[in-house]
Structure formats: structure tokens, C-alpha cells
Amino acid sequence: EPEVTQTPSHQVTQMGQEVILRCVPISNHLYFYWYRQILGQKVEFLVSFYNNEISEKSEIFDDQFSVERPDGSNFTLKIRSTKLEDSAMYFCASSEFGEAGANVLTFGAGSRLTVL
Amino acid sequence: GNSVTQMEGPVTLSEEAFLTINCTYTATGYPSLFWYVQYPGEGLQLLLKATKADDKGSNKGFEATYRKETTSFHLEKGSVQVSDSAVYFCALSASGGNYIPTFGRGTSLIVHP
């Protein structure tokens, strides 16, 4: 069964440091996403990516965040200068179709970010 | 905007008990509705879905019926097992949100032997 792979599984960083979270989506999927979940809260949408550019982003996805697909397989989320409130579980997901109603996502296991 | 509200957890049950996890939604347009499940140490995975009113999604003994009149998509299972212990997420995608899935906060289910 194809799967989405995320690394690292857990990262601890100091406030103000840059963090890069990595994801390898399913190879024939065209749409890629980052979500996050702060402990005890909703799974929140951050950004979607299609055809090598951002297609949608939420209010959370400010100038501190960026995404990139540096090669044909990896999809990365960068946080430039981490804040305490960035501590969360970050989920990468991919899907085959971005529209047509039943947009089913395949998720990775998540990267837990702890900012001290 | 789109939103999903699901019941607070944890839900704690004995094996073979009946399960209901409530989910209601607000959406622009006609949403598709989903339940995802997250087992410990794993990512969210699709459990079942329904794409139009009165559709029933089902998988692994779980069922949910798309109720447009009550804007609900409650998850049910007649007899839970210890292996069903996980976090369950209700979600929707709709044209009003460019089909980007909106999730609830998740409900933790703990099943005791």
C-alpha cells in the first residue's frame, strides 16, 4: 500500500530557529497539503500545493512559513523563525484529485514539533 | 465558512458496546463527508465517506449516514473491539472551500477488554 512518509517524527528546537519538515507524498498524487494540530485542538489546514505552486493557504500560513518541492519526490515545510505557539503535530497529505467533491487525502504519520 | 464539530472525548467503552460519535457540520455548497481514523503512531486514514444526502458510508463495521436535514454525520458501530481504540476525525470537503478538507478536533475512543 503506498504511503506518505514524514521526517523527522519529532523535532525539538529553540525559539527563533529555522525548522524544515520533510514529506514524501505518494508518487502519482498531484495535490499536496500541510495541516497542523495543536494539542487538544482541531486539525487545521495550512497550505495546499499543486503544479509547483501554492494553490490555497490559510490565515495561519503567514510569511514565517514556506513550502517547496525541491525535487520530484520531496515536499517540505519551512518555518523561518519558530515561536512557542508553533509547537504542534504537523501532518503532510497528498491526494490524486483536488476537486470533484470527494477529495480523499492520504496522510503521513506526522512530525511533532516542540519549540522551547 | 466550513466547519465541523464533533463530540469531546475521550469516549471509554467496554468491548462489544455500541458506539456513537456525534458530528455536525456547517458548509457552503453540498459537502462530501468523511470519517478518518488515526491509530497510535500512524497518520490519519480514511475510514468511510458519503458524497450526497442520505448516503450511508460503511467500513469495518462502522457506519455513518449523511443527514442533510440535521447537518449531521454521526459515526456508529454496533460492537466495538479493543482494536478500534483510536482517534476518530470527522471531516468535510465542499466547493465553498475549494474542496480542501476541513477537520474536527478528533474524538479519542478507548475500548477496554
Image (tube, coloured by chain):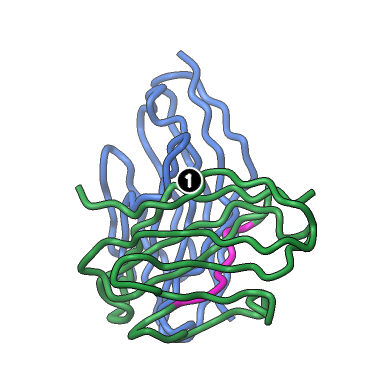
Chain colours: A green, B blue
Residue A59 seen in the current view: yes
Residue B13 to residue B40: above or below: above
Give how far across and how far down residue B31 sits, in percent.
Answer: 40, 75
User: Which residue shows up at 68% across the image and 70% down it?
Assistant: A80
Query: In the image, what residue type sits under mark 1?
Result: Tyr
User: Which residue shows up at 28% across the image and 75% down it?
Assistant: A30
The residue most toward the top is: B113
Callout 1: chain: B
Residue B52 seen in the current view: no
User: Which residue shows up at 45% across the image and 13% down it?
Assistant: B113
Give how far across and how far down residue A24 sits, in percent.
Answer: 35, 59
Instruction: Choose top left, top right, bottom left or bottom right for residue B76.
Output: top left
Give the SS element for disc 1.
strand
Give how far across and how far down residue B75 sits, in percent.
Answer: 42, 47
Specify whether residue A73 is painted magenta.
Answer: no
Instruction: Choose top left, top right, bottom left or bottom right for residue A72.
Output: bottom left
Q: Main secondary structure of the magenta part?
A: strand
Judged left or right of residue A51, residue A86 is right
Residue A17 versus residue B77: which sits nearer the camera?
A: A17
User: Which residue shows up at 56% across the image and 64% down it?
Assistant: B4
Judged left or right of residue A45, residue A24 is left
Judged left or right of residue B107, residue B50 is left
Specify whether residue A47 is painted magenta.
Answer: yes
Judged left or right of residue B49, residue B103 is right
Residue A104 versus residue A21: which sits nearer the camera?
A: A21
What's the magenta region? A42-48
Residue A82 versus residue A89: which sits nearer the camera?
A: A82
Give the mark count.
1
Residue A10 to residue A93: above or below: above
Give how far across and how far down residue B24 sits, in percent.
Answer: 54, 61
Reading the image, the residue beneath label 1 is B88
